[in-house]
Image (cartoon, rainbow, N blue to C red):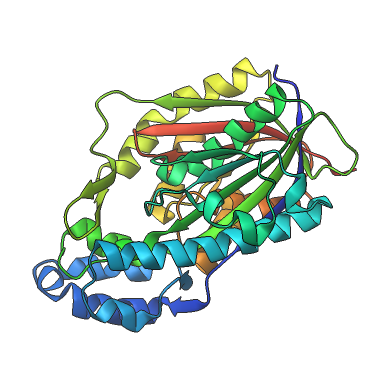
């Protein structure tokens, strides 16, 4: 068993522009008109996605024109930096800390490229010390929230007195493009939004902890690189999203998930707190793990209110769960490019 790590603060943030699903549908009709003319059934995903709204770093009219890499990158740098600062300040305040108290910062983001990375760009504004250790992570996609927390917990265990700040910030909407009209692009337009979440970790058990983080594990299936990810071209990122994803999850998730729970001697049916990648994926997770869909009420509500924000989404779910009556052991779970399942054991500190 891994030594426990205290989760001392957890906060979320969204950008200023709210996009209702009806607005997104109208925009998609215009942007993806040729594809929708050939596959009108694709519009059903907007009605069946379980999403009422999501938030964007850019106003809806920004998507009416084409944008190149430099333009998308500047929006990413500005918007992601602002969300980073917002989420970090909230989480640190909840933990009773200032930015200068942070020893290690883990930054998870796969929807833009920043060199220097985001934590360096906001260091002066937040007040990080000059000797802070920076750990920027790219490429984890939707699994980044769980994997980022697991990496942060490992770092906290490795330096017992260190205070670790984990930030996941994703601007998925910047991948919406007028020049790409594949089925995957239409589906992503119905699902994805922008957001950020931050967590403060420290090794050991404290009475003020929101929860205790235990062991983490990842499982990557071979020859699955085409299930989820990015393609890259002169305009920007292009979404890779296989239609086989829900079926793959339904058939293949159970074995590594149950093996992880068994290795930790968790109860036979531990609470799974999951990244809500979409309604189809949530249903597939439920089928794979034998979980009644009603137990995903928090996941569905986060999806309804924010859409799929990639890495931060599962941290939004965890924030809500920890604010409720649930107590006991649980497994945080998410799926991402690789194709990889990421798991993290935790125990709430209620009572």
Residue positioned 53% across, 19% down in the render: 259
Percent position of residue 345, x then y = 65, 30
Picture layout, residue 79 above or below residue 94: below
Picture layout, residue 17 above or below residue 75: below
Residue positioned 91% across, 39% down in the render: 207
Instruction: Say whether residue 143 is left or right of residue 94.
Output: left
Picture mark count: 0
Picture layout, residue 343 above or below residue 255: below
Quadrant of the image occupied by residue 14: bottom right
Answer yes or no: is residue 40 visible: yes
Residue positioned 45% across, 71% down in the render: 57
Where, quadrant-wise, is the C terminus in this rendering?
A: top right
In this rendered view, identify the residue nearer to me: 53 or 82. Answer: 82
Picture layout, residue 161 above or below residue 14: above
Quadrant of the image occupied by residue 226: top left
In this rendered view, identify the residue nearer to me: 252 or 158. Answer: 158
Q: Residue furthest front?
A: 130
């Amino acid at each position: 068993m891994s030594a426990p790590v205290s989760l001392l603060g957890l906060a979320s943030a969204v950008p200023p522009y709210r996009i209702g699903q009806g607005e997104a549908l109208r925009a998609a009709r215009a942007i993806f008109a040729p594809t929708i003319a050939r596959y009108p059934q694709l519009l059903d995903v907007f009605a069946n996605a379980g999403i009422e709204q999501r938030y964007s770093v850019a106003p809806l009219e920004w998507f009416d024109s084409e944008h190149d890499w430099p333009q998308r990158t500047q929006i990413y740098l500005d918007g992601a930096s602002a969300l980073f600062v917002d989420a970090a300040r909230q989480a640190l305040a909840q933990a009773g800390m200032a930015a200068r108290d942070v020893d290690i910062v883990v930054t998870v983001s796969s929807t833009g490229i920043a060199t220097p990375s985001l934590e360096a760009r906001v260091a002066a504004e937040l007040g990080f010390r000059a000797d802070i250790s920076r750990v920027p992570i790219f490429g984890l996609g939707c699994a980044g929230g769980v994997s980022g927390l697991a990496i942060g917990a490992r770092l906290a265990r490795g330096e017992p007195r260190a205070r670790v700040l984990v930030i996941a910030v994703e601007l998925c909407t910047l991948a919406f493009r007028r020049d790409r009209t594949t089925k995957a692009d239409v589906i992503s337009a119905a699902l994805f939004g922008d957001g950020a979440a931050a967590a403060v970790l420290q090794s050991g058990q404290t009475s003020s902890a929101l929860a205790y983080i235990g062991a983490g594990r990842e499982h990557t299936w071979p020859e699955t690189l085409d299930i989820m990810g990015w393609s890259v071209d002169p305009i920007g990122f292009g979404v890779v999203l296989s239609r086989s994803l829900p079926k793959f999850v339904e058939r293949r998730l159970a074995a590594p998930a149950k093996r992880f729970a068994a290795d930790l001697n968790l109860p036979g049916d531990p609470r799974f707190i999951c990244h809500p990648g979409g309604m189809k994926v949530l249903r597939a997770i439920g089928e794979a793990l034998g979980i009644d869909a009603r137990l995903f009420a928090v996941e569905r509500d986060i999806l309804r209110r924010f859409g799929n924000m990639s890495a931060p989404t599962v941290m939004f779910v965890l924030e809500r769960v920890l604010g409720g009556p649930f107590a006991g052991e649980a497994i945080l779970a998410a799926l991402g490019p690789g194709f990889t399942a990421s798991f993290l054991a935790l125990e709430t500190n209620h009572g």
